[in-house]
Amino acid sequence: MKEVTIYTDGACSGNPGPGGWGAILEHKGQRKELSGGERETTNNRMELLAAISALSALKEPCSVTLYTDSQYFSNAINLGWLRDWKNKGWRRKGGALKNPDLWQQLDALLQTHKVKVVWVKGHAENEGNNRCDALAVAEREKFA
């Protein structure tokens, strides 16, 4: 299995408002940057779309270490929230789950790839996360 490192970030101006996401994929010294955005979205949707887009870009099952500054995303994976939401019919304890469409896409990708999610502090010393933030902000500005 190929080992791939992925960095992701999302940005939104207002919540909802114009948003963007950025992702970097690294494998054996090669690097690919991806980005996109939407006119009316939320920061959490952009965080999820960054991860979904990066994992979707992989052409075969891979072992992935994915770095994110989103506790929403990292906790959902690492603390088992995603598994619980799925088991409850894509609902959470308090009622309706936000972004079920994206969580379902992400769940399918997690069945394909072996993914370890690592939380990093945003706007700190992680070069990959900082570059993804710049990509996300640039995309957000296209819709602002």
Image (spheres, helix red, strand yellow):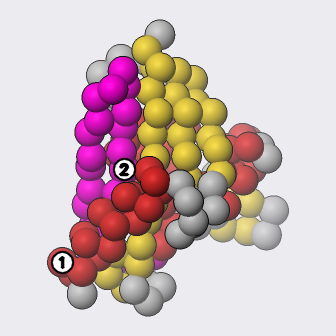
Q: Please name whichever residue, 95 or 37, is drawn nearer the observer in this view of the structure.
A: 37
How packed mark 1 is, by other alpha carbons closer than 10 Å (few <14, some 14-19, many 20 or more), is: some
Q: Residue 81: which disc?
A: none
Q: Which mark is residue 23?
A: 2
* Secondary structure beneath label 2: strand
Residue furthest left as drawn:
142
Figure label count: 2
Q: Which residue, as the protein is rendered here, is positioned at the far top?
A: 1
The quadrant holding residue 2 is: top left
- Vertical placement of 86 versus 36: above or below? above
The answer to whether residue 103 is above or below residue 114 is below
Q: Is residue 102 left or right of residue 76?
A: left
Residue 12: where, in percent of width, then height? Answer: 41, 78
Magenta stretch containing residue 49, yes or no? no
Q: Is residue 33 visible?
A: yes
| Left-right relation of 72 to 27 | right
Residue plotted at (39% across, 86% down) = 13
Q: Quadrant of the C terminus?
A: bottom left
Q: Which mark is residue 142?
A: 1
Look at 37% across and 58% down and name the residue there: 131
In the rendered view, tell whether residue 20 sits above or below residue 115.
below
Q: Which residues are magenta?
A: 20-42
Q: Amino acid at mark 1?
A: Lys
User: Between 112 and 9, which is closer to the camera in this rendering?
Assistant: 9
Q: Residue at x 37, y 33 (%)?
A: 26
Amino acid carrying label 2: it is: Ala
As drawn, is 53 to the left or to the right of 43?
left
Q: Position of residue 114 (x, y in %)?
A: 57, 23
